[in-house]
Amino acid sequence: MNDQQLVEKFPLIKKMQNTEEVIWFNPNVIKTEDAMKHISVTSEMVQDASDRLDRFASYLQIAFPETAKTNGIIESPIMAIPTMASAIKDLFQTDFDGELLLKCDNALPISGSIKARGGIYEVLKIAETLAIREGLLTQTDDYAVLANEKMKQFFNVYSIAVGSTGNLGLSIGIMSAKLGFRVTVHMSSDAKQWKKDMLRAKGVEVIEYAADYSKAVEQGRKQAENDRTCFFIDDENSIDLFVGYAVAASRLKKQLEQLGKKVDENNPLYIYLPCGVGGGPGGVAFGLKLLFGDHVQCFFAEPTHSPCMLLGLMTGLHEKIAVSDIGLDNKTDADGLAVGRPSGFVGKTLEQLINGSYTISDETMYRLLALLVDTEKIQLEPSALAGMTGPIHLAKQGANLQNATHVVWATGGGMVPENEKVAYYEKGRRYFKF
Ligand SMILES: *Cc1c(COP(=O)(O)O)cnc(C)c1O
């Protein structure tokens, strides 16, 4: 299909080309249990990941003392943000029913973003597999032994490679280096300088590219191809990453129960997930659909300049289409979302499950960033605000949001240095002056 035919078949593309904020509802959604029949990822695989993270808890408490207060479990808080809810209703002059909650993955220990879920999980799985294979560990051991110098020397024979826009590099880099692995992060041009500096300070090799994310991933893959001691963490295709993210669902379920939030036919749950290549938000959405079925609706949120997942899902072309194919430049300050071509694995897995996807401009993300500081004293990085306009879109489209619980997934910001935080905030405030 050429450009013209695409626009004829999918008129929304015209608006996307004009970088307008749009929402797309997925016409291919079917009942969750029917959709699951065509999916190779299973609840057993997610449970296996959850069990593995439990096995590592005693090690993580030693390696990262900040995880001691959650007994070595890497999890983030959830909180109601009523003042922010009022503020965004005012800002967009749109009311919506239901309570607004923030899932604070910016506060995840170790690397301060959603990547502390999948990214760290996959590194741990590699470490466990190697140590068991060499007879240095069994599943019933206390994994605290992994903190020993001897283990570090063992892992140092191996290396880990990854391509990233920044946050995945931070997660993989910090975790791998701590275990003793040699690690190389291939960084795209969008990656922030401070993220590169932080990794280098931890002994991680950072290779920079002038090109975007897809190129960085390709280079990582190439590095590992000819080296049997090198493991490539494939952000575009990894099932391990995906199930690591999916573990978030059972944790969220418990948190909602603790808050007294019901989720059923009359009390729908809406989740808004900032989306880059798709693994993080896709994994979380998948896990939630496994647990809540049709009672949860999940939406992806992407920058107006990088709506790769929306484009891939809507056209059914998945990884065979990129935002450049419709003339978009993939330039956004939301560095975690600066991805031009979606994961085909994630798109195909979720094509009958995900409820929709919408876009948000950088300006809106910055405004919301400043507003969240002013109303709730929480500071995120720009990407992490993308979920915030979800309830507004749905209300404008006339969705029935009665008794709804809205969860905006705040995907990152915990590692942002103080001076960068101030700059983000001031940029957001400036947009209110006009
Ligand atoms: C990576 C990232 C996302 C999106 O995750 P993907 O797996 O790339 O879709 C969202 N927000 C932040 C802050 C991120 O770093």
Image (cartoon, rainbow, N blue to C red):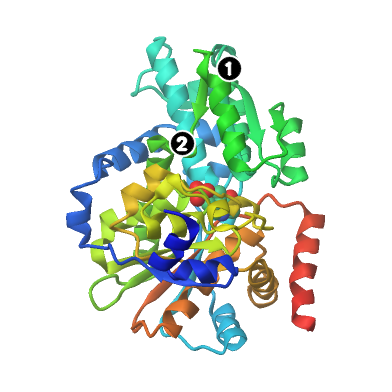
- In the image, is residue 338 above or below residue 214? below
Compare residues 128 and 336 and report the one nearer the observer. Answer: 336
- Residue 354 in sight from this viewpoint: yes
**Which picture quadrant has residue 195?**
top right
Q: Is mark 2 within 8 Å of ligand 1?
A: no
What amino acid is labelled 2 in the image? Tyr
- Which residue was labeled with disc 2? 121
Instruction: Please tell me the numbered disc located at residue 304.
Output: none
Residue 312: percent from the left, percent from the top?
43, 54
Give me the residue at 38% from left, 85% from top.
Answer: 398
Q: Up-down: is 275 above or below 400?
A: above
Residue at figure coordinates x 63%, y 39% from the top left: 170
Q: Which one is earlier in the sequence, the residue at label 1 or at label 2? A: 2
Please tell me whether mark 1 sits on a helix, a strand or a loop: helix
Label 1: few (<14), some (14–19) or many (≥20) C-alpha neighbours in 10 Å: some
| Residue 65 visible (yes or no) | no
Coordinates of residue 278 in the picture (x, y in percent) = 46, 50
- The answer to whether 284 appears left or right of 212 in the picture is left
Pick the front one: 385 or 189? 189
Disc 1 from disc 2: Cα separation = 18 Å
In the displayed structure, does residue 199 sit left or right of residue 229?
A: right
Residue 205 point in image, percent of width and height? 70, 26
- Amino acid type at circle 1 is Lys
Mark 1 sits on what residue?
A: 152
